[in-house]
Amino acid sequence: MERTLDDYQEWIRNKIKKDEYEKYLNEGKDFINEEEIVEKLRTEKKADGKKVRDILQKSLAVQILTPEETATLLNVEDKELWQEMQDVASKVKKKVYDNRIVTFAPLYLSNLCVNNCLYCAFRKDNTIVKRRKLNLEEVKKETQVLTGEIGHKRLIVVYGEHPETDVDYMMESIKAIYSVKEKTKSGWGQIRRVNVNAAPLSIEKLKELKKVGLGTFQVFQETYHHQTYRKVHSPGTIKGDYNWRLYCMHRAMEAGIDDVGIGVLFGLYDWRFEAMGLLYHARELEKKFGVGPHTISFPRLEPASNTPFNQQSEYKVSDDDFKKLITVIRLAVPYTGMILTARESAQVRREVLDLGCTQTDASTRIGIGAYSDRYTTQEGERQQFILGDTRSLDEVIRELAERGYITSFCTAGYRCGRTGDKIMKLLRTGQEGKFCKLNAVLTFREWLDDFASEETKISGEVIINKEIEEIKKKIPTFYPKLMEYYEKIKKGERDLYLYLPVS
């Protein structure tokens, strides 16, 4: 007999551990000071060019901005100043991450959920959605396609909030993903980094999740505006507790997970306020733990099946404002990775990539079981929202190469211990970009030989040869070892990387 949500009431009641966030409150208040944010956005206006340029120099020095400085940038109206800001954002990205773009695939493992978010097609009251959870053999089948046919090396696995997909299922599914090893044209493919996008968890469960090789732990606040949060998240649901979600990264840090990802669903409330909220969150993590967010995501509200709220929102973000918010995030939190997703159209992604983005997905399918089922249409009853860019990984990589970017499949830094405060030190000094260039070349060689179409291989060879020449000139100490590994990869060896120890 199929179980209903009534059967899970005890699990729902016991999910939130209030003592795990109440200890961080300041006289009962969280760190999102709405009155202060609104006041700074109101008063930090009409800044002259000199003030803005002084702030930009701070970004170029890879220093996180203050709320006042960020509000100043958000209020810039002069088009020429915005162009300067965009140019500096691009320079910051190049300084910190070089010309690498990391690619990944999202893998939705379940659309079961006990919450009722107004903007989400997976909300529990949406009866149109076909509910499903992948079993472990299906998880492996999805992974086989992603590693053996497409060539991905890292995933972001996505779970709804439901007792059937709690931490035990998360752990077993991650183990299943890591266990898959598929033959390719010239070698073999395997997922080397599994990041998780899931509901907030307790410290105890986060410690368990870390044991199975968790990468970055992502939880998006969706909106930092308290009233809007209450409006779109039903009272009485787990997600209805603002602070349980807001402090989930504090718990992750306590649990020893030092790479965390934050984000906002832009379109729920005013985008300038939300950008300030992301800054406040980053500064809070730095203050409490000495480490800011490993990544920031900035998805926009998109149409979803049987979800009228998404069409009615008064806070939809225009393409021009989208460019501005990406620019300001890069300048305000200059060390963070920035994730641009296939929610956006191919054209929008072309226009905003240069503004500071470091990661993007490709060959994306967000239906449950969608990679192995190979359905060709975006079926509303299977997806959380409608995708804007459904191009293959091969097409995306070819375009990136033609624009001067090398696609990196590198995961070596995590295995060398370059996480948390260690990677932050390297990012702030521009050293991480140099180190990662080496292993980006090695992993790109793998992908070109195993998966690239002839057309993409032509573009890929141009960019990889350019990168090798740059390494020879700028990092000569590592050049001999790089070329030794490079030749081994051309002969069929896989998963070779230069070990760069950290203190």
Image (tube, rainbow, N blue to C red):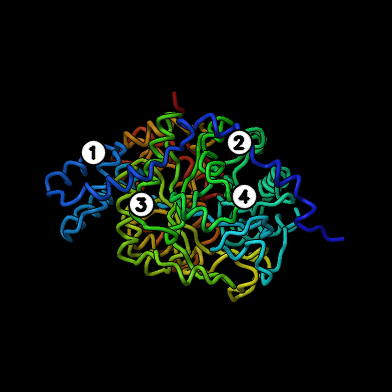
Query: Pointer 3: what residue?
Result: 273
Q: Marks 3 and 4, Cα distance to the nearest angstrom? A: 41 Å
Q: Marks 2 and 4, Cα distance to the nearest angstrom? A: 39 Å
Q: Amino acid at mark 3?
A: Phe
Depicted 435 relative to depicted 461: above or below: above
Query: Pointer 2: what residue?
Result: 18
Depicted 120 relative to depicted 53: above or below: below
Q: Which label lies toward us, 3 or 1?
A: 3
Mark earlier in primary sequence (1, 4): 1
Q: Which label lies toward us, 3 or 4?
A: 3
Q: In the shown orientation, is residue 4 left or right of residue 425? A: right
Mark earlier in primary sequence (3, 1): 1
Q: In the shown orientation, is residue 315 left or right of residue 133? A: left
Q: Which label lies toward us, 1 or 4?
A: 1
Mark earlier in primary sequence (1, 2): 2
Mark earlier in primary sequence (3, 4): 4
Q: Amino acid at mark 4?
A: Gln
